[in-house]
Image (cartoon, rainbow, N blue to C red):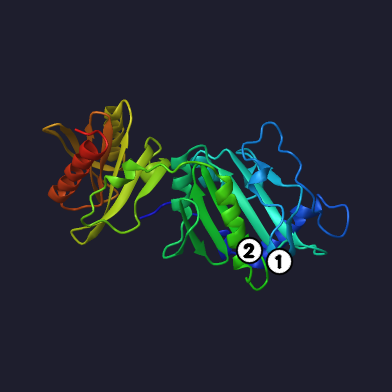
Amino acid sequence: MRVFGILHASKRPRAIFAAAAWLGLLTGLSCRCAERISPTPAPPHAVVPGEMLPRDLSGGFSLAVPLERYGPSDLWKKINGGAELFISYGFRELLAGSFVRAHSRLPELEASIYEMGGDLNALGVYLAEKSEGADKAAVGWEGYQSGDGLFFYKGSYYVKIIDLSEDGSLGNVVREIAQYVDSAIRVRRRGVPEMEVFPREGMVAGSILYVHRDALGHGFLKRVFQGEYALEGKTATLFYCRQEGAAQLLAKYRDYGEEFGQVEREWQAGDLRLLSVRAFGNPELVFVRGDIFGGVVGCPDQSAALRLIRALLANIDRQIDGS
């Protein structure tokens, strides 16, 4: 079960977004219409180049200036209620720009480019916000359309483009912006082998996630990969992470079990150190092997959970470690 996600911009009323974007524009206007000139150079400390946004578009749209920039300390001003999610994934900077037509005072399109500090961070926040059953979009490394918005990630960037028009008829221009930004992000695609090692049998399609911190609600679990499985008529979560001192995570999980439930058993099974706890009435089997810590949460059959763990580790050995 996903514990992340915020309300998409595309799911909020257009009028609210148009008005908010309009108010932001008014601070940079000196006449009745939005200024449409070349964006000023980015400040020296800027992370996202201003040139990543197009200046002119079809339909008579132009980029309004000044552009908006936000960092971790003031992101809440732009996405109040959503900033915490982005910061938890390593957010560094947001560059946002609105697009207006000649002699118009209201922006009808808005593009937001989030620099997340790394490929996995961008993927993680993209997946956390992704709408269930959204239509795929052929842009970036992966993208989708939802409501009046188009969303994608590429490299360390997560991009949102929203149609603010009253009738939501600017889909072609939205795609034009997306293609421009996609082309401006010049990075070579790298796979995520850590997400390819999850066993396929019983996996819930589209459930594989990367969680940068506070995975499964635990403050001590960071940089975690997880996926959901149909096991014994239940939906269980298989997860793992790799770090030095993985054995310490087992100790912290033991403390968690003792505080919020009970520790049922701890034992050695070959190269695995296993711990079974029941917290909040939920069965959990966790393990440590070398620098790998992980487990299965929510599977009532401990044997099935252990088989899933061993299948995961076999894939890690073969596909990542080459052993």
The image shows residue 169, relative to residue 208, as above or below, that is below
Q: Quadrant of the C terminus?
A: top left
Q: Quadrant of the N terminus?
A: bottom left
Residue at 57 percent of width and 38 percent of height: 92
**Which of the 4 quarters of the picture holds residue 107?**
bottom right
Q: Residue furthest bottom?
A: 167
Is residue 59 visible in this depiction of the protein? yes
Return the disc, 1 or 2, that comes first in the chain's sequence. Answer: 1
Local SS, label 2: helix
The image shows residue 104, relative to residue 298, as above or below, that is below
The image position of residue 59, as x and y in percent, is 71, 66
Do the numbered discs 1 and 2 sit on residues whose CB atoms are within 8 Å? yes
Name the mark on residue 108.
none
Residue at 20 percent of width and 55 percent of height: 201
* Residue receiving disc 2: 173
The image shows residue 237, relative to residue 212, as above or below, that is below
Give amino acid for label 2. Val
* Residue receiving disc 1: 59
The image position of residue 105, as x and y in percent, is 80, 62
Does residue 61 appear left or right of residue 48 in this picture? right
